[in-house]
């Protein structure tokens, strides 16, 4: 896993990332690079979180090839760099051949098949007569629920507008039939053709919309200054896979940031943000959920106390209490507490960030990542954030400056690298 952060004010943006990477086996290494300079001429950087590879190719390789090909070319805004990078992925065939694209797509489809067959299998009692028939009937219900879940999302990704189910079906039909045969054999299940068609419809529905229930993606965080940018900005992209000349990605606008006169600072966190969120708001995310539920439970218990101590006819009081909207009361409580958190913690901190020097921005960014690492280390949690913390500062006048950066080699023995870095 990962913890990365970007802290922006009018002077600069500080970025920091840990070095931990978790392999499929669960083993954790602490040597991963997650921060890269994207341009030779402008202070533009990119951070990665979640998947370190894109369809089998390391993002580090892709980013460095892009930087080399970009050369001395520049763009007016940070958004232009982000758009050009996505365009670069298209031009290079997603850095994978047709087989790799199909394999990546089949891996996604297989995940849905295993998930839904597993759910259906649990619904049918072991040893039931006609178990195969009962599982298949339950499976159809589960698939239809899955189709409806994603079919209600009308936010279709740009690359998939106008992409019909028939086109998708023609693209995957031969390959997916082999997968159906292998997976259903593992479950000892015979899946008929109508069920297979339902499955393919469920794949299609989930692939074409923005909402995507999987961790199999990479977060790309673009930040810095374009040629005409006076203040820094940040653009967050979720990218999943490419197939059939289409790229499954979207801009996560909720996480984007742009420094202006009216919005002079921001702290943007990605991946494992619970500790950083606690520092910024004064309340741990899980504790916030607890006190909201506790308040609702308290109101309910208070009603019971009133009833037990009320000596007159309880009918009218019971009717009144039972018809009190506890969810509405909890919402009011939550809004009041959010206001307190914003006024007491978030607003003063952001005001302070607006005035920080470049050195202080870098120190704050490093400290937030290190705090997450320390919390994981001294508790029973998996140490999924760790290793050296890489830190860089991007400013309009000084460019991309490394504050801390791990190297896998001795710089004194490799002067050619330092000479040719840019």
Image: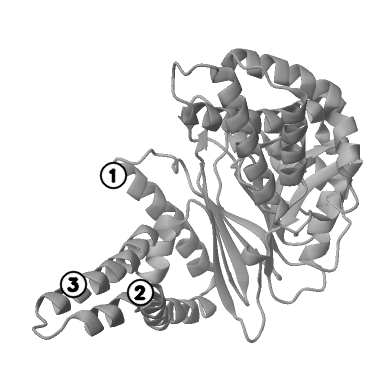
Q: Is 258 drawn above or below residue 310 in the view shown?
A: above
Query: Can residue 343 be spotted in the picture?
Result: yes
Q: Earlier in the sequence, mark 2 or mark 1?
A: 2
- Counting labels gives 3
Q: Is residue 134 above or below residue 351?
A: above
Gap in angstroms between the C-alphas marked 3 and 1: 42 Å
The residue under label 2 is 326
The residue carrying pointer 3 sits among few (fewer than 14), some (14 to 19) or many (20 or more) residues within 10 Å by Cα, namely some
Asked whether, in this view, residue 338 is left or right of residue 14, the answer is left
- Asked which secondary structure carries label 1, the reply is helix
Q: Nearer the viewer, mark 2 or mark 3?
A: 3
Disc 2/disc 1 C-alpha distance (Å) = 39 Å
Residue 157, image x, y percentages: 79, 54
Residue at 48% x, 29% y: name it.
Answer: 122
Mark 2 or 1: in front is: 2
Mark 3 highlights which residue?
A: 304
Q: Earlier in the sequence, mark 2 or mark 3?
A: 3
Query: What's the mark number on residue 135?
Result: none
The label shown at residue 378 is 1
């Amino acid at each position: 896993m990962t913890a990365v952060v970007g802290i922006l004010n009018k002077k600069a943006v500080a970025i920091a990332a840990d070095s931990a990477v978790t392999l499929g086996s669960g083993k954790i290494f602490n040597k991963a690079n997650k921060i890269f300079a994207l341009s030779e001429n402008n202070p533009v950087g990119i951070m990665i979180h979640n998947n370190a590879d894109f369809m089998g190719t390391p993002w580090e390789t892709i980013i460095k090839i892009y930087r080399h090909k970009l050369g001395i070319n520049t763009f007016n805004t940070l958004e232009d760099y982000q758009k050009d990078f996505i365009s670069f992925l298209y031009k290079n065939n997603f850095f994978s051949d047709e087989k790799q694209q199909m394999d990546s797509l089949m891996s996604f489809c297989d995940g849905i098949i295993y998930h839904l067959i597993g759910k259906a299998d649990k619904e049918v009692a072991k040893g039931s007569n006609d178990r195969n028939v009962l599982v298949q009937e339950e499976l159809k219900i589960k698939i239809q629920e899955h189709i409806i879940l994603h079919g209600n999302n009308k936010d279709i990704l740009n690359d998939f507008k106008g992409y019909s189910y028939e086109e998708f079906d023609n693209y995957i039909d031969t390959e997916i039939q082999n997968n159906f045969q292998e997976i259903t054999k593992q479950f000892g299940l015979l899946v008929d053709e109508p069920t297979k068609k339902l499955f393919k419809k469920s794949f299609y529905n989930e692939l074409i919309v923005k909402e995507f229930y999987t961790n199999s993606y990479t977060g790309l965080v673009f930040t810095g200054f374009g040629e005409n940018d006076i203040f820094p900005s940040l653009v967050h992209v979720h990218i999943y896979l490419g197939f059939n000349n289409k790229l499954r990605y979207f801009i996560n606008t909720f996480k984007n940031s742009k420094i202006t006169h009216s919005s002079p600072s921001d702290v943007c966190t990605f991946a494992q943000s619970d500790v950083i969120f606690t520092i910024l708001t004064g309340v741990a995310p899980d504790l916030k959920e607890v006190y909201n539920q506790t308040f609702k439970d308290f109101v309910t218990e208070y009603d019971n106390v009133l009833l037990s101590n009320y000596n007159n006819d309880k009918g009218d009081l019971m009717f009144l209490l039972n018809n009190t909207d506890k969810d509405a009361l909890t919402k009011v409580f939550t809004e009041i507490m959010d206001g307190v958190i914003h006024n007491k913690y978030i607003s003063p901190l952001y005001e302070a960030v607006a005035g920080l020097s470049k050195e202080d921005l870098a120190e704050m960014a490093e400290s937030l990542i290190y705090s997450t690492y320390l919390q994981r280390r001294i508790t029973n949690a998996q140490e999924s954030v760790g290793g050296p913390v890489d830190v860089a500062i991007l400013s309009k006048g000084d460019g991309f400056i490394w504050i801390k950066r791990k190297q896998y080699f001795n710089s004194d023995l490799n002067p050619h690298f330092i000479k040719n870095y840019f």
